[in-house]
Image: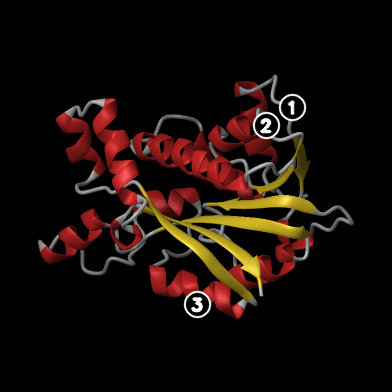
Amino acid sequence: MSNTLDKHVAAYQGDNLYDFDNEILLTWYPQRVLHHAGAARSLLELGLGHGYTTDIFSRRFERHVVLEGSPAVIDNFHSKHPECRAQIIETWFEKFSTDERFDVIVMGFILEHVDDPLVILRRFREFLAPGGRMFIAVPNAEVLNRRLGQLAGLLDDVTTLSENDHLLGHQRFYTVATLSDDVAQAGCRVDRLEGIYLKPFTTRQILSLQLDRQVIEGLCTIGVDYPELSCGLFAEISAR
């Protein structure tokens, strides 16, 4: 397999300013998946990334399969989580195929990376078991701190990708409207929409405040009801 994705591994090795945000996002939304997944037993997860979610999910699901296209990211994960029980398959999402059907499919901060999100949504809805549910998390262009930055003249367009976005391999931001549109075009419907982490200021500003963990938890809890203003969008979707 081509290792073209390996160039992004540096973003997942723990030396980035935005690791603060990533830890918040990537430890919060898995808890929302588990909250809504009920007694589901099998999970297909797209992407390893920082490894937070795979480590969390592997403790809960009897059957846990993870797809990852970067050998370097896989090696990085194994070095940090050698005891993880998940089955990790090195593959491109667009090429993966299986006769297995899963109770839950999770695409956590994946659709902003891929060339064609509709291809991914359409392909993976076919791998859902009857009554299965798919959960999606994506970055929100209209998060409160980006809106504020634009109003203050610090940001020309809330959808502009930053240097860090390019380091992570991001190709796009989402809004509530564009995520809903992609889901509908893929032949699915949004059954639930939540926000992930109501972020009022920039990462540097928040770090300078040295907020208690309870305050961060509070911002995540408030964000559930305000997806339009939150750092990430979390959607539960199903095939129509």
What is the basis of the colouring in this image? secondary structure
Mark 3, Cα crowd under 10 Å, few <14 / some 14-19 / many 20+, is some
Q: Does residue 116 appear in the picture of this structure?
A: no
Which numbered marker is on residue 181?
A: 3
Distance between mark 3 and mark 1 Cα atoms: 36 Å
Extreme residue toward the left, this view: 152
Q: Is residue 86 left or right of residue 107?
A: right
Say which element carries label 3.
helix
Q: Does residue 188 appear in the picture of this structure?
A: yes
**Tags 3 and 2 in contact by the CB under 8 Å rule?**
no
Pinpoint residue 133: horizontal percent, then vertical percent.
66, 57
Say which element carries label 2.
helix
Which label's residue is closer to the chain start, 3 or 1?
1
Say which element carries label 1.
loop
Question: Which is nearer the eye, 156 or 198?
Answer: 198
Which label's residue is closer to the chain start, 3 or 2?
2
Which label's residue is closer to the chain start, 1 or 2?
2
Extreme residue toward the right, this view: 99
**Tags 1 and 2 in contact by the CB under 8 Å rule?**
yes
| Figure quadrant of residue 25 | top left
Q: Residue at x 68, y 41 (%)?
A: 39
| Figure quadrant of residue 184 | bottom right
Question: Which is nearer the eye, 116 or 189?
Answer: 189
Residue beneath disc 2: 58
Q: Residue at x 19, y 47 (%)?
A: 201
Distance between mark 3 and mark 2 Cα atoms: 31 Å
Distance between mark 1 and mark 2 Cα atoms: 6 Å
Pinpoint residue 191: horizontal percent, then vertical percent.
54, 65
**Amino acid tagged 1:** Arg
Pinpoint residue 48: horizontal percent, then vertical percent.
62, 41
Which numbered marker is on residue 85?
A: 1
